[in-house]
Image: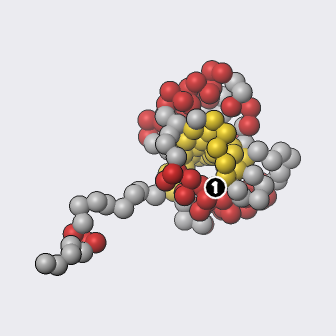
Amino acid sequence: MKKPSGANSPSKPPEAPVFFLDRSLGKNRVATALSQAGATLHIHDDLFPPNAKDEDWLAEAGQRGWIVLTKDHRIRYRHVERLALMKAGVAAFILTSGDLQGEEMAQIFVKALPRITRFLKHHTKPFIAKVAKDGSVSLLFQ
C-alpha cells in the first residue's frame, strides 16, 4: 500500500502569520524591512486614526488573527489594554529595548522573525511576549 503524498494529505500547512504594526513602530522603516524579509503586515495608521484607542485596534487585530508588533512596553501594565488584548485573543510581541532608531528596530524585528514564527507554533494565544535587542523572544504574560 502506498503512503499518501503530501499533495494529497488532508492537513494543510499552517498559514504564515499576518502582522499588525502598532503606531509606536512608525510606518516606514520597520514595515519596509519586514516586508522585504517576506512578512505580510498591516500598519496602524493605514487602518486607524492616529488617536485610536488601543482597545479598539486590539479588538480588530484579534478578530482578524493579526499578530501585534509594538514597542509600547507599558501595555502589559495597563489593565484596560491588557484585558482588551487577552479578550481579543491577541498574540503581541513587544520590543523591550528603549531609545532605538527606526533602522535598529527594523533590524531587531527582522532578526527575530524566525523566532517569532516558532514561538507562535508553540504558544497558545492570547499572550504577550518580549523581543529583546538580540532578537530573542520570551513569554511575559499569558
The image shows residue 106, relative to residue 56, as above or below, that is below
Q: Which colour scheme is used?
A: secondary structure
Front-most of residues 74 and 54: 74
Say if residue 42 shows up in the picture. Answer: no
Q: Where is residue 53 in the image (x, y as percent from the top left)?
A: 62, 26
Quarter of the view holding residue 102: bottom right
Give the residue pinned by disc 1: 31
Tell me which residue sits at (50%, 27%) in the image: 87
Tell me which residue sits at (17%, 78%) in the image: 2
Quarter of the view holding residue 106: bottom right
Q: Position of residue 116 (x, y in %)?
A: 59, 55
The image shows residue 89, relative to residue 3, as above or below, that is above
Label 1 CA crowd tier, 10 Å (few <14, some 14–19, many 20+): many
Horizontal placement of 44 versus 7: left or right?
right
Say if residue 132 shows up in the picture. Answer: yes
Q: Position of residue 130 (x, y in %)?
A: 69, 45
The image shows residue 66, relative to residue 6, as above or below, that is above
Quarter of the view holding residue 68: top right
Q: Where is residue 37 in the image (x, y as percent from the top left)?
A: 60, 66
